[in-house]
């Protein structure tokens, strides 16, 4: 028996001895990912784990040119597969996983790249690594030498991968000709188009529902205004109808005056309220940033709360007091993880901005969150979809 053959047997013996450890790690990873995605609104088909069989491992060790010194050199002995329903959720899923784990993209081999060019279906793979802080915990120390591979796919891509594995064996055994391979390429193209079409249909349905909700909201608002107008006009029937007439310019001036009054009240609240001042200071201290006052930021806050019809300072104070603990947790993500860079300056009233995000996250409705963000937030380096899903994920993690 050659030296390398002895080494193969040693690796296989190690595999047998550590099988239960690998199974435990696989189950732990699946459990963590299930908990992570339960905090999001991304529809997930399945999250599963697999351990390479002894036979597959032996064949891998015997491959031409393969040199493995120990079991830890096998990077995909444990594999985790996250299967989403829609292709446009893949990048979101990867982004969310990256908040709990360290993930590194695994480049395709030459053969895999050729196969992808032929079949046109992208199957992303990553190394899935626990953060260093986890490995220092007693319950994770025993997993430090184990590697795991992460696959993130749609349901159609996952089905294609499983089917293709069968045909790959046929190719190896010379049981399939080039004409059959070309037909397989056509099938893969149809699946790719189906993935794209499902995303289009989903986006169209979401858009229709959003428009329907918006129209319903506008209708309800119009009805409320009509009722209020009729109620206000009842006394006018006993008086001169022209005595209470108000033109559009007067209404605009009144609205502007009310808004400026609210801005002034909000400014007094931010500068003097004990809870607001303490939370703003907590945010600036956490990021080692300068706490400053900014008129434009205050005006933006006033607009946000006016649009939410929460333009009474007393009501805002109640919400701020009730959510101070969540604000202390969520602010680390709003100004940190969900932004490209930590802030150099923190404006007075930033705690109210975090409160705004909390209030929309409390709805649990991703479309409402996205609509509010589109109307009230200037995003840089992140899409509305990503920010909305991140917000809901971190909010559920914070409460």
Image (tube, helix red, strand yellow):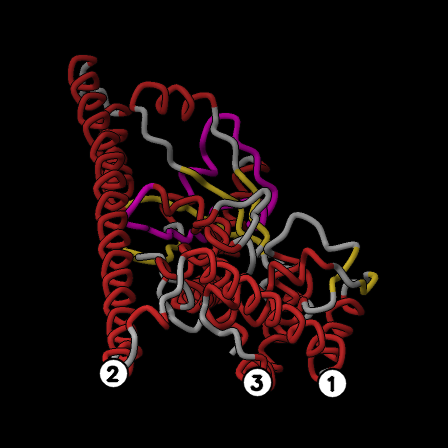
Tell me: residue 151, above or below residue 117: below
What residue do we see at 26% from left, 34% from top? 196
Give residue 45's position: percent from left, percent from top.
27, 56
Residue 190 visible in the shown view: yes
* Magenta-colored stretch includes residue 75: yes
Mark nearer the N terminus (1 vs 2): 2
Query: Circle 2: is it few (<14), some (14-19), or many (20+) Cα within 10 Å?
Result: few
Instruction: Give the magenta range.
Output: 58-87
The disc label shown at residue 314, or none: 3
The disc label shown at residue 137, or none: none
Task: From the viewer's perspective, tell me whether residue 343 is left or right of residue 361.
Answer: right
Tell me: residue 214, above or below residue 122: below
Residue that label 1 marks: 274
Q: Which callout, 3 or 2, points to the residue nearer the camera?
A: 2
Task: From the viewer's perspective, tell me whether residue 397 is left or right of residue 269.
Answer: left
Estimate the spatial distance between the alpha carbons at disc 3 and disc 1, rounded to whole Å: 14 Å
Tell me which corner region of the image, top left, top right, bottom left or bottom right, holds residue 276: bottom right
**Disc 1 secondary structure class:** helix
Q: Residue furthest top?
A: 178
Give residue 379's position: percent from left, percent from top.
56, 47
Mark nearer the N terminus (3 vs 1): 1
* Magenta-colored stretch includes residue 371: no
Estimate the spatial distance between the alpha carbons at disc 1 and disc 2, rounded to whole Å: 50 Å
Give residue 204's position: percent from left, percent from top.
23, 43
**Disc 3 secondary structure class:** helix
Is residue 221 or residue 38 the one in the foreground? 221
What residue do we see at 70% from left, 83% from top? 275
Residue that label 2 marks: 238
């Amino acid at each position: 028996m050659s030296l390398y053959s002895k080494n193969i047997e040693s690796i296989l013996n190690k595999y047998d001895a550590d099988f239960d450890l690998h199974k435990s790690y696989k189950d732990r990873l699946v459990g963590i990912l299930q908990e992570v995605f339960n905090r999001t609104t991304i529809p997930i088909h399945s999250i599963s784990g697999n351990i390479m069989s002894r036979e597959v491992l032996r064949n891998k060790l015997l491959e031409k040119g393969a040199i493995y010194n120990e079991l830890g050199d096998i990077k995909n002995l444990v594999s985790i597969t996250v299967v989403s329903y829609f292709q446009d959720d893949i990048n979101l899923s990867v982004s969310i996983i990256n908040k709990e784990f360290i993930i590194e993209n695994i480049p395709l081999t030459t053969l895999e790249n050729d196969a992808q060019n032929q079949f046109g279906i992208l199957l992303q793979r990553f190394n899935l690594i626990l953060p260093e802080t986890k490995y220092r915990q007693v319950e994770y120390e025993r997993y430090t030498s184990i590697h795991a591979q992460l696959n993130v796919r749609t349901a159609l891509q996952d089905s294609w991968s499983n089917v293709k594995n069968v045909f790959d064996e046929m190719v190896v055994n010379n049981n399939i000709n080039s004409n059959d391979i070309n037909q397989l390429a056509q099938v893969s193209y149809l699946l790719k188009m189906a993935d794209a079409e499902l995303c289009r249909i989903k986006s169209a349905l979401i858009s229709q529902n959003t428009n329907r909700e918006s129209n319903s909201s506008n209708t309800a608002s119009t009805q409320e205004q009509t009722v209020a107008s009729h109620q206000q006009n009842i006394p006018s029937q006993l008086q001169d109808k022209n005595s209470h007439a108000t033109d559009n310019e007067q209404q605009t001036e009144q609205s502007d005056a009310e808004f400026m009054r609210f801005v002034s009240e909000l400014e007094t609240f931010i500068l003097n309220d004990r809870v607001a001042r303490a939370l703003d200071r907590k945010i600036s201290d956490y990021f080692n940033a300068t706490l400053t006052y900014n008129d434009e930021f205050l005006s933006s806050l006033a607009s946000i709360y006016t649009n939410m019809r929460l333009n009474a300072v007393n009501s805002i104070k109640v919400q701020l007091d009730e959510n101070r603990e969540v604000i202390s947790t969520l602010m680390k993500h709003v100004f940190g993880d969900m932004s490209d860079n930590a802030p150099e300056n923190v404006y007075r009233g930033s705690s109210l901005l975090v409160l705004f995000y909390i209030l929309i996250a409390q709805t649990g409705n991703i479309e409402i969150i996205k609509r509010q963000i589109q109307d009230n937030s200037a995003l840089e380096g992140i899409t509305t979809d990503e920010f909305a899903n991140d917000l809901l994920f971190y909010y559920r993690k914070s409460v």
